[in-house]
Amino acid sequence: MKQSRVINVLFLLPCVFSFVMIIIVPFFFGLYYSMTDWNGISNVVTFAGFKNFRNLFSSADFLYSFLITIAYTGINIVFVNIVSFGLSLIVTSKVKRRNFYRAGFFVPYLIGGIVLGYIWQFILNNILVSIGMNMSISFLQTSFLSLPHTVIWTMAAVNTWQYAGYIMLIYVASIQSIPSSLMEAANVDGASYSTRVFKILIPMMANAFTISLFLTLTTSFKQFDMNLTLTNGGPATRFLDMPVKASQLLAMNIFNTATANRMAEAQAKAVVLFVVLLIVSLIQVSVNKRKEVEM
Amino acid sequence: MKDTQQLNSKWQVSGRTTLVLLEVFTIFLFILFMVPFGMVVLNSAKTSKEIIYNAIALPSDWGQLGVNISLIFNNSSVDYLGAFLDSTLITLFSLIVIVIFSSMAAWVLVRNKTVWSTVMFMAFVAAMVIPFQVLMYPLVRWLRVSGSFFGIRLLGTIPGIVFAYLGFGSPLSIFIFHGFIKNIPYELEESATIDGCSRGRTFFAIIFPLLQPIIVTVLILNGIWIWNDYLLPLLLLGSNGVVQTIPIAVTAFAGAYLKQWDLILTSTLIAMLPVIVLYLFAQRYIIKGMVEGSIK
């Protein structure tokens, strides 16, 4: 018995030790630093109470990033889920080479945000513009990344290209687990295709929607890599009479604040990100779970 | 994953015309998804001038691709080959420690039904909601302080970042292993214990081999993430440290050769290629692993 207790401790030790060192300790330090004057240079850190948080809500640059992140997340949730649900219907239909297509749609997910940000920057700034020039299509001649009102939509489109194939896999797995007898019965009853999809398929897939919405919500809210290499926050625009970066999402705002050695302020922003993300995802999951039961 | 052919086909669209239209639409979509990759390959085989002149034309000489690739590997400011090697080592070592240590921890947590094991498991699960942004700067400071206290260099070294990946990767991995081990009958272990097998050996000789299918899932989920990860290596290794990873090398390269798309695109091509080649060979496992990892 004694020997087995030693084994238990030994087996748990590597994970627990790294978990405490890498997540738990930095987490509590992080909460503390958000209430200090930490600047990353001086070794002396003094307590400042909720000053950093109070300042955040009067900072145009933070409020803008916050609102734009919410808008971006909302657009993404709609885009990604509609496209991936459509793709999942296609690759489970009778279309030839459907397994090949399924594998192909997933490829963008494998490429990291950094790399695909550059690829799309090239496509949007060079390819599309050059097509616009050659064929005299005026709306293509200025890059979608250089206009404050199109840049968020464009980022959401790129993000959809990356994530749709992954979310599609979740929907496909869900469709495949629906008993075929159910669909056959509907077919015999003469239900139309759209009735079958909306009245049977979607309600049966409620669980997959909960997962997919959660995944798109959390990944969009924390978006950083693609934001950095696709737009780096640009172009410039104005908000509340202050100059701000039109596509600077929250994660990038935190990063830039810290790069400017305003570490405590960056930390306070990160804590706000954490709390908001926690609340929104808890609401989303509980609402979806309730819907699942109703269906 | 099962082929979709044998599955419920009764609910799907029917009629020849509809199917043909759907087929055409799917091909169109597929091309739309693949065009970005095509553009990368096309323009990696051009000179900077050619790209500016016409970005959508076919390259005049495919040999330029070789020239661009050698320019990147022989670059003086960014050591691409070194970054490639470091990325491979970091991903490999991180995956090994994550799989071995997380499965060990998950097994102990499943087989010991005490308050402590429940609390510990809950802590791992709860930690998954913490965004990286909250941890990243305190982590760097903490690793510097604790590293100098223990006399180990945790920043800028491969062991340091592997240790960090173990910390970030173990919650999800323990969660996945936990769900799988719960369904392995305890009787298997009991009979081994009666035969005089020690606890430690019971795990490695009996349980660990049974985990094989779920190990694939854990490897794929963590592998894609670690290989493409940017922020953690940037913060722990620095943008021009001795140890580099592929995503850092790509950004360093793009920063040094502003708007020189011939070289930037070739560097992204080199960064993508290993992943895509691996995917071609292990496609079935990767898709299955992704689905299982996200549904659990």
Image (spheres, coloured by chain):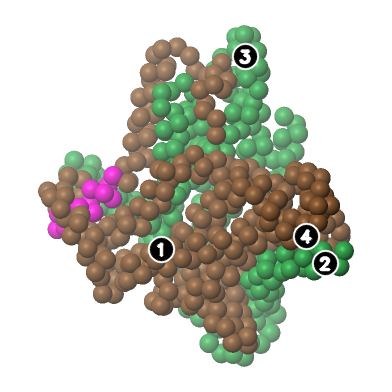
Chain colours: A green, B brown
Mark 3 lies on a secondary structure that is helix
Specify whether residue A50 is painted magenta: no
Furthest residue to the front? B195
Residue indicated by mark 3:
A184
Quarter of the rendering occupied by the C terminus of chain B: top right
Q: Amino acid at mark 3?
A: Glu
- The dot on residue A3 is 2
The residue where tag 1 is placed is: B247
Labels 3 and 1 touching (C-beta < 8 A)? no
Q: Main secondary structure of the magenta part?
A: helix
Q: Which residues are magenta?
A: B38-50
| Image x and y of residue B262, in percent | 22, 58
**Height in image: B23 above or below A146?**
above
Which tag is nearer the camera, tag 4 or tag 1? Answer: 4
Q: Disc 4 residue type?
A: Ser
Q: Residue at x 67, y 83 (%)?
A: A48
Q: Is residue B42 magenta?
A: yes
Label 3 chain ID: A
Q: CA distance from mark 3 to mark 4?
A: 54 Å
Q: Are marks 4 and 1 in contact (CB under 8 Å)?
A: no
> Do the CB atoms of the residues marked 2 and 4 lie less than 8 Å apart?
yes
